[in-house]
Amino acid sequence: MSAAMNILVLEDEQRAGEKLIDFIKIFQPDATIHWERSIADGIQFFEKQPDLDLIFSDIELLDGNVFQLYARITPECPIIFCTAYDAYYVDAFQTNGIAYLLKPYTALQFKAAWEKYRLLFETTTT
């Protein structure tokens, strides 16, 4: 992708958020990465900056379940879910979910989700 990506990370855990951002930087070093840790902060973010290329989303945030956020805000970009909960597959794919990484996920699993995003959404110019 030629233009810098605009990516949102919704993750309440410090270490998990840092790990996720480190992985993103490996595959997209020039990306603009925003990090929000709660539903309330996510809603405020979307009110100011709704134009995103990709979201990496945990499910349980500091102030509740992320699907409360997605019930109020409908992102127009794909979502890769990164969570310790395996019970939300259906909910994830009823939003814009394209991949579901179960914590603790590996670099190889992250790469597979990233490649799926690229396959589905990367545009090529000729």
Image (tube, grey):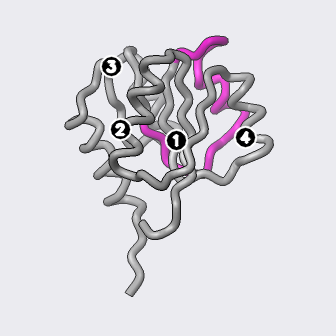
* Quarter of the rendering occupied by the N terminus: bottom left
Q: Which residue is mark 2?
A: 23
Relative horizontal placement of residue 107, taking residue 69 as reference (left or right): left
Relative horizontal placement of residue 48, taking residue 94 as reference (left or right): right
Q: Which residue is mark 1?
A: 55
* Quarter of the rendering occupied by the C terminus: bottom left
| Amino acid on which the number 1 mark rests in the picture | Ile
Q: Which residue is mark 3?
A: 103
Where residue 21 appears, x then y in whole percent?
A: 44, 35
Instruction: Examine the rendered structure and indicate whether residue 22 appears above or below residue 120.
Output: above
Return the residue found at the far bottom. Answer: 126
Query: Who's the residue at 67% across and 28% down the image?
Result: 69
Label 4: how many residues lie within 10 Å, few (<14), some (14-19) or many (20+)?
Answer: some
| CA–CA distance in space, label 4 to label 2 | 23 Å
- The segment highlighted magenta reads 60-80
Asked if the residues shown at circle 2 and circle 1 are in contact, with their CB atoms under 8 angstroms apart, the answer is no
| Amino acid on which the number 3 mark rests in the picture | Lys
Q: Which residue is mark 4?
A: 46
Question: Residue 106 — which label?
Answer: none
Return the residue found at the far left. Answer: 108
Query: Disc 3 or 2, which lies upstream in sequence?
Result: 2
Describe the element under mark 1 as helix, strand or loop.
strand
Query: Disc 1 or 4, which lies upstream in sequence?
Result: 4
